[in-house]
Image: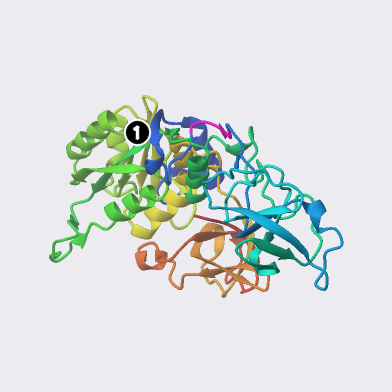
Amino acid sequence: MNVDDERNIMITDHRTASGLLVKYVSTAGTEEKDIEELYGRILAVDITAPENVPCFRRSPYDGYAFKASDTENACEESPVILDVTENIRAGEVAKSRVISGTAIRLMTGAMIPEGADAVCMYEDTEYTETTVALKREYHSGDNIISPGEDIKEGTLIAGKGSVADAGLTGTLASLGIVKVSVYKKPLAGIISTGDELVDAHLAPTAGKIRNSNRYTIEAALKGIGYDTVYLGHAKDSIEDTVRLIKRGQTECDVIISTGGVSAGDYDLVPEAMSGCGYEIPVRGVGMKPGMACAYGFANGKLMLALSGNPASSLTNLQCICFPALRKLAGYREYEHRLISMKLKEDCPKAGRGTRFIRGHIEYENGEVYLSASPEQGNAVMSSAIGCNAYGILSDMKAPVMRGTVISGFCV
């Protein structure tokens, strides 16, 4: 930690601050969800396969099932002619057994008849209603999907803390698993502060601005699996701020406020937090943008008081707070996964300390590049449009040139 002389506030290193939040929070409770509601939810249990998929031998093609031994020495000039005894579709079971000299016509996905150990495609044969000519040798097991070829019984399908996607949902359906234990979505209460704010649907008068932070923070939280509730807009008064915080303490798993955390006469949120029983171990983070903040703990719950500057609050939320918030939501992999990336353009915003650069990932010639947003200012919210990654610049001389290798992470 170091003291910021201008504001006389103890500043915490960004890694320390993020680690402190992660250490404090614990995962939310669990609930059962039907498979129709599973997408995007976080699994609260390991899921193993209760059976093989498929559970029987089946055909990958429209074709014929037969004994491979019948095709010995078969070739274009001297094909083997087999009698077709039956025609079955997917979902049907053959009435007869394949014996030497016979074949059964079948469709894609159909169960392999008893006695057959190979399949050929229609396109590789000449056939009539009652016979089929095979023009090459086949071996036992050719073109047969075996039981468990997709999933073997007892296989771990997905681990606790995984995010349910389309592939997992379909796989569970194939196994007959239609109810799954997931972590409850945490509820985040959003508080806006400041006399200068007006609702987004209103035309601001002189000196006023629309309240964009509410919607930015809500959208970011929903992207990691949260439900949100807007607790309200606190004017620049301790009483108003305390009232909304107390409501959030009762209703929500975490409170996130924007504005009122710098060192001005009307930056009252930290004082209101203390009045509501919060211990505040972090009163600013060594980063740009997003240094102004206050993180508090009370009664097992977290409050994140962020800057009122739009880009600053989003950067702090995503870069410092997201790991703890993902842990609270139940993610197994909640920490940022650092990757190496090259700067796509020169970056004039560097210098002492740590700066998080907003941008998006591009891939060129097998390498990862960060294409930085052209404007990186604290109040430039539009630079976050399409942003899916941050680069980290630490104590680098300005400007940092294109092609420089830095660390970063995706969000």
Say whether residue 273 is visible.
yes
* Residue density around tag 1, few if under 14, some if 14–19, many if 20 or more, within 10 Å: some
Seen as rendered, the residue at the extreme top is 299
- Colouring mode (rainbow / by chain / secondary structure / one colour): rainbow
The answer to which quarter of the image holds residue 120 is bottom right
Task: Looking at the picture, tell me which residue is in the foreground, 56 or 99.
Answer: 99
Q: Please tell me whether mark 1 sits on a helix, a strand or a loop.
A: loop
Task: Looking at the picture, tell me which residue is in the foreground, 149 or 34.
Answer: 149
Point 30% across, 50% down: residue? 259
Judged by its main secondary structure, the magenta piece is loop
Dot 1 corresponds to which residue? 253
Residue 77 is left or right of residue 38, and the answer is right
Point 67% across, 74% down: residue? 365
Range covered by the magenta-colored residues: 44-49
The answer to which quarter of the image holds residue 127 is bottom right
Task: Looking at the picture, tell me which residue is in the foreground, 284 or 212.
Answer: 212
Point 80% across, 72% down: residue? 76
Spot occupied by residue 221 in the image (x, y as percentages of width and height): 37, 48
Spot occupied by residue 89 in the image (x, y as percentages of width and height): 53, 52
Say whether residue 139 is visible.
no
Spot occupied by residue 153 in the image (x, y as percentages of width and height): 63, 34
Q: Mark 1 belongs to which amino acid? A: Asp
Residue 35 is left or right of residue 348, and the answer is left
Task: Looking at the picture, tell me which residue is in the foreground, 197 or 150.
Answer: 150
